[in-house]
């Protein structure tokens, strides 16, 4: 194994942007706070020094127009990266994202295209509450013409962001706030992780766990304990929600016959429903037990830590689901993974305010 | 203004008028199976504005786009074919009348969500500035569009960055059947809004092509010399129904006398009289022009009617660019 | 059977509004074109004459603010009905609908509520194209705090709209353009169809068809031909997409063991996926064959009739799915329902333009 | 202005200041587990504005809402409990600092999506007009909020309907770390935008509570006498970081000298000096006031800290109203 270059997720994002900007003079990045001292959780730090204020820009708090402006620039040759500090703010820009960007290539018969990356951060914890922690990936995945990417590892973050920037379509790139300080191997050079390929990050023969973004880490935690219990999980990190890599998921379920889906969003009408529908339509006879989805309950995100504690499912819910799926009783005492930090902070050294 | 320009302006208005009337005439055959928003009565604005633009300049438009498309030089044949839903249409039949495009002449596209193409036009101007190009962008929109917040967001950004963009508001007093007074405060002009943003602003007679031409000239010069954006509000009137081929003054949402007053101020009649009075064109010239235009539209109609329909296998094409 | 009072769908809507307005002085209706001569496909005709311009209002083309204004008025005691002529225009108002209205009751601890009906029309046909014919019900159904209603019959249209107006929550009320001239029994007096109850509109023991809005009519057409083939379908019109009446659907599938879902929206990540996920999670062992979903393919709505012909599934697709579900081969010749009108118009006497 | 009013204005500013400082002090204990946006430095605006409002009048606010809530008369105890995420908080712990509410005094609510509560405030004014009530609504927002299109949509509608609403723009020169000049055209005041909409507009010193009081008085009179909306732009400065308890001038996004200049213009210092010079209050009075306020906040802190956390069974409560 080659020497590992261990870097945090936020830096992987930062490198992807910097390297694409160095590579292609038409790439620019724009968004509230992009050149500010905090640099969008570190992901844009240093860029303005390297590339100057004409390519690394702040903007007015005008999400709708600014998205349209990014689209307009894209259709005449620029390659904008737009960032939103919270996905919730992008609700103001959906006319531009959905009616315009997603349709642009199709509705003009393929004559133009809109190569645009929209980075959006999914919040969570520390009382972000109902308007700063929604996880709306299924909305975007529902829309033809958009691609939807949700990286989990620093390696994928960099590789997928580079591919997204180079892609000729509007790409919704969703970064989970709690991943920014996760560390992993990140090669220094430019490399590409293709869109539309899921990643089998753990092999196992008993249960397939299909997960998105931060839930993949929860699945990994769960799998260690499950392993001890003799349940071997296969974990598939979806990575690209649209276009979905059905083949990888179906292949795994064909092997395990069992499916648990763990998504960061709401369960009802959420992305996890798509995975279950896709598998049952295609592999009905191979499924050995009912598929199970794990996601947020059907209520807004509560602010108080006393409530958010019960709002976000994690490794323990995945353990229970996997055991249920293989027909085993759950046993609270042995199965419970004890928390190493308060449930509402991303890392042990987090002290607020966001 | 030289005679050639004057004649060209007149000819282009006449051409748009005749084309639109032909569309209206054929629409009832049920072969153009998409909504159409005709610009009959408003031809002076696209013509007077686009006279200053080259193929390198960009135009974006709204639902009422035929005039903008044609004045910018968009191909007539593929426009007609598009309205007929044909594979040889400018958007391969996927867009229809509400999604015309001809990138070869800088008519980037039209989109019917009110005000939605304004930021996209601003984005093209922004790109030009970032790339150091010498282009001007024009956004056409109606009075209704100025009620959308995105319009103001665009004015703010254009003013902030001093972008080479010209906002053209075609104020025809109505949004569908709704008069201005149920939508905007009484006595407050749209151009005043732009002044609030500290944008160079002029209010003009949109039925006087020479007035449109003159005001736009200055705005284009401003834009080309990096002095920033302008907004021009042009008063005008749509002669037919909001969407579709018919007249609809019998519905009662606008008064007959109002409509009649505007008919007297028809931009084409007005220019015809002006050119006639000056001896620049004769009735014979006009007959000649009409003939030329009708021939052109006839062959475009044939092109469209005979064109092939798109086939099932292209339904899923172009969802994604490769 | 009592005498039937046959009325078109648009009039059922009109009556519901008029009767609620007569009943409750705080109800008002606002939207682009509400008092205009066409009266939103006839649904608002005569209202301004009856209730005056202070309760029946046009508005500026400012979807976002106007939705917020409706919300503001609702939280201090009014009961607004907001109408959008196309659901596509409401994309401008999603911050207000999703961040604000949906959360209002919850995020302030139940102290206030936002009783607001947002009527949105789902377009289709006659070249409405990519920006005037989206069917985004799954977006709204995904959001806690919203209720989502899609009536099919004139009877339900009136009864559900009355209940929606009287409901103390934000209700997204989706009307399919192609239903306006459908006729059916509509009682004259005020009556209520409860939210959260699906409707079994046809009983059968072989296959359950769960359908939404206009697809329910297609299912009915399909069922007649299927009946002749000896396949007895049970059709469940979902009516209220959120809260979903799981019980009725599960009960039916428990009986038939087979499921076809027909929705007006996109298949991928659409509402049909939720129905399938819900059924497979709960009734895995009772399902006899793979569930099948029918919806729009993963591409924008094309304008040309030559393409839209292949875009919208209908009775024939439902027939094929039902046959497949009971393990029968499909037979194009006998099964095909021949169209009685061009595929891109709602009724035989439609001549454009929308 | 009578002495009693002057003293009350001063007292209320002082109270908000001390409460905010207490929050900052306790925030580092990691028990207030939600973002907080303190209004230290900006107290004159909520105090001067709300002085003219009764409990029947409505206020809506944004992320930086503590001052608005308190000045409108919102309960301190349940505000503190809310910030602590407790069941006895004003929103049962579900909202936190960014979603304060106290309907009993007309403080309807705060929402942190920039500009999002402006239309809701307009809606309350609209309802009042529809119902024929005699209420005034106030929307508080920052300079950043004026960049959102919805702000303009609101001005247009308020002007169209002559609604009894007052738009209060707290212009503190920054949106998070971004100065005005990267967001709005140079030399264009926010109040100018409102003039473009033909709305009664004034620009005032937001650090001078008497100035705020006087300008608001007129605006409220206008609203109550059905003359329509006003917009007041008040210049001010936030002393601490955008979100959180700390000072952050060391980050370099604003200059030390700028910050120092504004500290000298601290609204409380200024008023204290004014009242002292006039002999209206003495240092002794102030010590007395501080003591009173500290006692109040101490018992509110106890209320909050000792309050019960919401329990799992209320998680799914109040998703829907019955
Ligand atoms: C966001 C949005 N809201 C509503 C509509 C419906 N609509 C289509 S055209 C139109 C009229 C717009 O009026 P104006 O901008 O004055 O243009 P005109 O038709 O008068 O040329 C409206 C309201 C739409 N297409 N998009
Ligand atoms: C729509 C939206 N965009 C961005 C944000 C992130 N944000 C939170 S507060 C804030 C600053 C707003 O500045 P201003 O309105 O001037 O208020 P101030 O914080 O200065 O009081 C921003 C950009 C948000 N909450 N909502
Ligand atoms: Mg108009
Ligand atoms: Mg500010």
Image (cartoon, coloured by chain):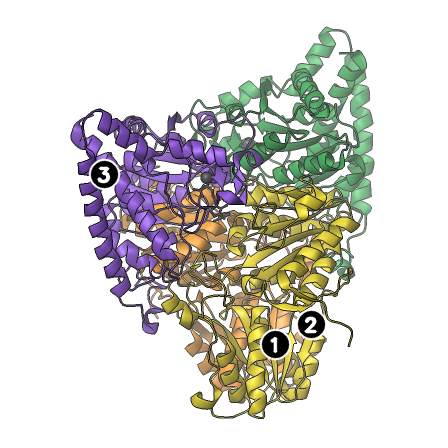
Chain colours: A yellow, B green, C orange, D purple
Q: Mark 3 points at which residue?
A: D11
Point out residue B98 in the picture as x, y percentages from the top left corner. 66, 43
Between C138 and A322, the residue placed more toward the observer is A322
Mark 3 → mark 1, Cα distance in angstroms: 59 Å
**Label 3 packing within 10 angstroms: few (<14), some (14-19), many (20+):** some
* Residue A242 image label: none
Q: Do labels 1 and 2 share a chain?
A: yes
Q: In which quarter of the image is ligand 1?
A: top right
Dots 1 and 2: beta carbons under 8 Å?
yes
Most foreground residue, B216 or C79? B216
Residue at x 57% of width, y 69% of height: A214
**Residue A88 in the figure: left or right of residue A104:** left
Residue A232 point in image, percent of width and height: 62, 88
Q: Which residue lies furthest to the top in this view?
A: B278
> Mark 3, chain letter?
D
Q: What element carries label 3?
A: helix
Answer whether residue D96 is visible to the viewer in this image: no
Taking the spot 56% from the left edge, 57% from the top edge, the residue there is A121
Say whether residue D66 is left or right of residue A153: left
Residue at the disc numbered 1: A210
Mark 3 or mark 1, whichever is nearer to me: 3
Q: Depth check: A168 or C251 in front?
A: A168
Q: How far apart are marks 1 and 2 (CA)?
A: 9 Å
Q: Is residue A333 left or right of residue C168?
A: right
Q: Which of marks 2 and 3 is in front?
A: 3
Q: In this view, does C105 lie above or below D185?
A: below
| Residue named by callout 2 | A198
């Amino acid at each position: 194994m080659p020497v590992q270059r261990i870097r945090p997720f936020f830096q992987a994002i930062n490198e992807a942007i910097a390297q694409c900007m160095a590579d292609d003079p038409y790439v620019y990045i724009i968004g509230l706070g992009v050149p500010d001292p905090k640099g969008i959780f570190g992901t844009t730090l240093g860029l303005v020094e390297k590339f100057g204020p004409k390519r690394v820009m702040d903007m007015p708090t005008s999400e709708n127009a600014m998205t349209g402006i990014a689209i307009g620039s894209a259709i005449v040759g620029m390659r904008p990266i737009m960032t939103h500090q919270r996905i919730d703010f992008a609700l103001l820009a959906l006319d531009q994202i959905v009616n315009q960007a997603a349709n642009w290539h199709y509705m003009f018969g393929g004559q133009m295209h809109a190569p645009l990356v929209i980075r959006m951060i999914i919040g969570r914890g520390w009382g972000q509450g109902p308007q700063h922690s929604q996880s709306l990936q299924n909305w975007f995945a529902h829309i033809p013409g958009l691609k939807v990417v949700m990286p989990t590892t620093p390696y994928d973050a960099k590789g997928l962001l580079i591919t997204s920037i180079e892609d000729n379509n509007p790409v919704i790139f969703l970064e989970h706030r709690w991943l920014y300080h996760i560390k992993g191997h990140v090669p220094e050079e430019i490399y590409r992780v293709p869109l539309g390929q899921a990643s089998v990050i753990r092999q196992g023969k008993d249960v397939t766990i299909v997960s998105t973004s931060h839930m993949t880490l929860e699945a990994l935690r769960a799998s260690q304990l499950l392993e001890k219990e003799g349940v071997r999980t296969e974990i598939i990190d979806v990575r690209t929600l649209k276009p979905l890599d059905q083949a990888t998921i179906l292949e795994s379920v064909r092997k395990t016959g069992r499916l648990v889906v763990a998504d960061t969003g709401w369960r009802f009408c959420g992305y996890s429903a798509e995975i279950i529908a896709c598998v049952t339509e295609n592999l009905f006879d191979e499924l050995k037990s009912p598929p199970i989805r794990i996601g947020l309950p059907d209520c807004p995100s509560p602010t108080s830590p006393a409530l958010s504690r019960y709002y976000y499912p994690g490794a323990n819910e995945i353990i229970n689901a996997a055991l249920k799926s293989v027909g085993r009783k759950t046993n609270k005492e042995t199965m419970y993974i004890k928390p190493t930090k308060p449930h509402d902070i991303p890392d042990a050294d987090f002290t607020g305010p966001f | 203004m030289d005679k050639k320009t004057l004649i060209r302006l007149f000819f282009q208005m006449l051409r748009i008028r005749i084309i639109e009337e032909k569309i209206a005439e054929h629409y009832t055959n049920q072969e153009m199976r998409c909504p159409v928003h005709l610009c009959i009565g408003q031809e002076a604005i696209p013509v007077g504005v686009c006279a200053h633009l080259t193929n390198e300049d960009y135009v974006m438009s709204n639902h009422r786009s035929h005039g903008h498309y044609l004045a910018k030089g968009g191909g007539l044949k593929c426009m007609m074919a598009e309205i007929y839903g044909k594979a040889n249409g400018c958007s391969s039949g996927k867009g229809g009348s509400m999604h015309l495009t001809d990138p070869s002449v800088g008519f980037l596209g039209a989109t019917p969500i009110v005000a939605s193409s304004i930021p996209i036009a601003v984005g093209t101007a922004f790109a030009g500035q970032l790339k150091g190009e010498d282009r001007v962008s024009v956004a056409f929109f109606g009075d209704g569009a100025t009620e959308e917040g995105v319009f103001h967001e665009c004015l703010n950004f254009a003013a902030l960055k001093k972008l080479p963009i010209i906002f053209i508001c075609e104020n025809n007093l109505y949004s569908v059947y709704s008069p201005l007074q149920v939508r905007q405060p009484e006595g407050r002009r749209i151009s005043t809004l732009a002044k609030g943003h500290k944008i160079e602003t002029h209010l003009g007679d949109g039925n006087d092509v020479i007035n449109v031409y003159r005001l736009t000239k200055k705005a284009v010069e401003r834009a080309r010399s990096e002095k920033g954006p302008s907004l021009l509000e042009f008063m005008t009137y749509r002669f037919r129904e909001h969407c579709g081929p018919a007249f609809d003054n019998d519905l009662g949402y606008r008064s007959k006398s109002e409509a009649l007053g505007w008919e007297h101020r028809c931009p084409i009649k007005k220019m015809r009289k002006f050119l006639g009075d000056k001896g620049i064109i004769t009735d014979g010239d006009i007959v000649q022009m009409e003939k030329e235009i009708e021939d052109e539209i006839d062959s475009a109609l044939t092109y469209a009617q005979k064109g092939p329909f798109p086939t099932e296998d292209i339904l899923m094409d172009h969802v994604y660019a490769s």
